[in-house]
Image: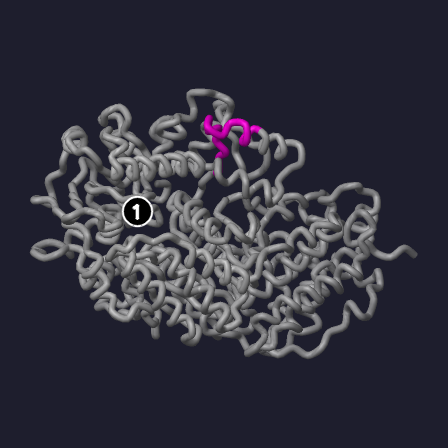
Amino acid sequence: MAEALAHSGGHLLASHLEKVAEIAAEFSKAFDTAVPTQRWAYLAGLWHDLGKYRPGFQRYVRLADNPDAHIEGKVGGREKTHSAAGALWAIQQLNQPNHPYGNVLAYLIAGHHAGLDDWDGGLKERLQSEDSQLELKEALAANPPTSILAHGDLVAQIPGGARGFALWVRMLFSCLVDADFLDTEAHFDAGKPARREGFPSLKQMRQAFDAHMAALPVADTPVNTLRADVLRQCRAKAALPAGLFSLTVPTGGGKTLSSLAFAMEHAQAHGKRRIIYAIPYTSIIEQTAEVFRNVFTALGDEVLIEHHSQFDAAEKDETARSRLACENWDAPLVVTTNVQLFESLFASQTSRCRKLHNLVGSVIVLDEAQQLPPAFLQPILDVLKLLVAHYGVTVVLCTATQPALNSTTYFDAIKNLRGLENVREIIDHPDALFDALKRVDVTLPPDWTTPTAWADIANQLSAEDCVLVIVNTRKAARELQRLMPVGTLHLSALMCGAHRKNVITQIKQRLQARREGRDQQPMRVVSTQLVEAGVDIDFPVVYRALAGLDSIAQAAGRCNREGRMEGKGRVVVFVPPERPPLGHLRKGTDACVSTLHGQAHDPLRRALFDRYFKEFYQSVNLDAKDIVKKLTVNDRKTLSVQFRTAAEAFRLIDDADSATVVVRYAAHHDEIERLLGVLAAEGPQRWLMRKLQRYTITIPQRQATKMLNQGDLSLPIPGLHVLSKTDNLYSNILGLTGDDDLYNPSGFFS
């Protein structure tokens, strides 16, 4: 009798199960120090495809010349399912009175295609069904090798207890699905594993960083002297024990490279495996990644992973190719977004969870930490504490405006914050640093309740020779742009990354030319808040529409950034014609007005931010979707958790139904068409997805559906839209154009 197959092309099932078990166990070693985890991961790998022994699947996989044949749900027929058998086997073999060990593995095995499910209302009922029972019966009747069915003793000591159970399961799940993906990948493409290698080590990167910084020409200015001291302190404090850190540096104080220096020094000092650099805005991630690539030029092109797309296909759309294209963050430096990082930490989907085990033993830098989403702040802080306490992670909260993340008790207990404790500040004297780097004077509105018309704002801006204005929404940016003189530049996230980069480069070049006397033309820029974090531009005058105090401070960081002016830069805060959209933008604005009302001194004093954030956080529900409750074990007899429901609820984008669109930006026409041609011919691949990211924007799904029906978009692969070849759909000034539905007012799509 022929040996059972795992996949088409002769991949033996027993070999696949044993290999996945070995890889998963190896992955789990990274968090096996305090809790014996390897045996759990090993058994999950050994039994994950036990159902493939059933005759129906074997008949199909031998007859089908289809790389998707092994993906459950991609082929019809009840006799071909295979993920329930191993889950039921684990329950039968491992569950004991008051110790439902098998249920842990059941979550992992039953979910390795469809994702982690809720126990009640999902997995429990599925495993009780006749189809699942038959699957196990048929698989066992095929007489799998005894070595596959065997098991040893398991010890359950959940890191973090009832609140830590869900993260521990997702970490195990990550080990399983990544091991499964990798062994399957190696079968279908024998050269793929070798192509994953080639990233430099963190040691090599640190050496390259030191060489780059030593060779950097730095003008002898007071600002650069302070930046050098920030860098020195970051390097010195890196030797401190792993844990929670804050890096509080004024905007323009060089915190991006200094925080990277701390992360690399700390990683080498404490044996950390990688650095995850998370940024709140998709719109600026390309710039930070570009800064880092410039630092590591000597090490070649493949030096980091830049991961911020929404290309991960839904499970129902999953194919063998989409599986190979998803990221597992197997690089020493990953630059990503808060959306990718935190949605992955709370995900149930296989492609999203795959990367989690690679977070273990890492340094996570949260750039612009004040942008942590308030509605999810409590579950985020809980998971950060678990990562630090049990998974060898160091977290750095990096910002000029540190949020009040320490534990806080309010009169209304529902508002209480279970915060971060023992956060160590890297900078010795932040207040002195802020005083030394004060480079602007801020003018506040004379009346907080009286708005200024856009036409009046446009007239004020037109009277300025060199000015940046930052508004709260895309719609506001579009309306103001139409009133501005010809030649005014525009920035919003309706422009793809390559387009934004070109405009920002143009802005920097013109500012430099103005300083050198080579450009006498007026320089005016209208932007959404995407320029407020990570964009190194330096205007003498900045206007800011009223918003949260942190946003005003970030805007001020674009004014006299380098301290080149003889006096102070000028920041003008104005009340725009429309109030901010309902939600956090408005609550932040209200907290700002409350904090600054009656203030006669500097409105950007560091002491004000603690007051501002406490008032802001008190105004919002810090766990608006009850994520903590959904992911806390409430029945120890079943270990019931709502993985799927929590993952669906944990969406950081206000408009949860968003769509990714590849646009046709004229300046890069040939490159875009070439990449789209490869996509059409060969399907999604990780390198290709990374290249296409530069030409994507994110829009509300409702607008994408509308444009798809109008023929303005196509959908070549699930999850990725492509703009049609129509000249009037993408403007070289405004980016993607369209009706009002396109100008989402949430503030996220900035």
Q: Is residue 140 left or right of residue 430?
A: right
Q: How crowded is mark 1: few (under 14 residues within 10 Å), some or many (20 or more)?
A: many
Judge left or right: residue 590 versus residue 473. left
Quadrant of the rendering where the C terminus is positioned: top left
Q: In which quarter of the image is residue 611?
A: bottom left
The residue singled out by tag 1 in the image is 532
Residue 566 or 117: which is nearer the viewer? Answer: 566
Q: In this view, does 118 lie above or below 686?
A: below
**Above/below status of 166 relative to 587:** below
Task: Kindly state the secondary structure of the residue where label 1 is placed.
Answer: helix
Q: Where is residue 269 in the image (x, y as percent from the top left)?
A: 48, 72
Q: Is residue 710 left or right of residue 281?
A: right
Q: Does the magenta stretch include residue 4?
A: no
**Vertical order, 101 against 193 (above or below):** below
Residue lying at 22% horizontally and 61% vertically, measured from the top left: 434
Q: Nearer the viewer, residue 644 or 714?
A: 714
Q: What stretch is highlighted in magenta?
A: 660-673
- For badge 1, the amino acid type reads Glu
Using the image as rendered, state which of residue 654 and residue 636 is in the foreground. Answer: 654
- Note whether residue 636 is visible: yes
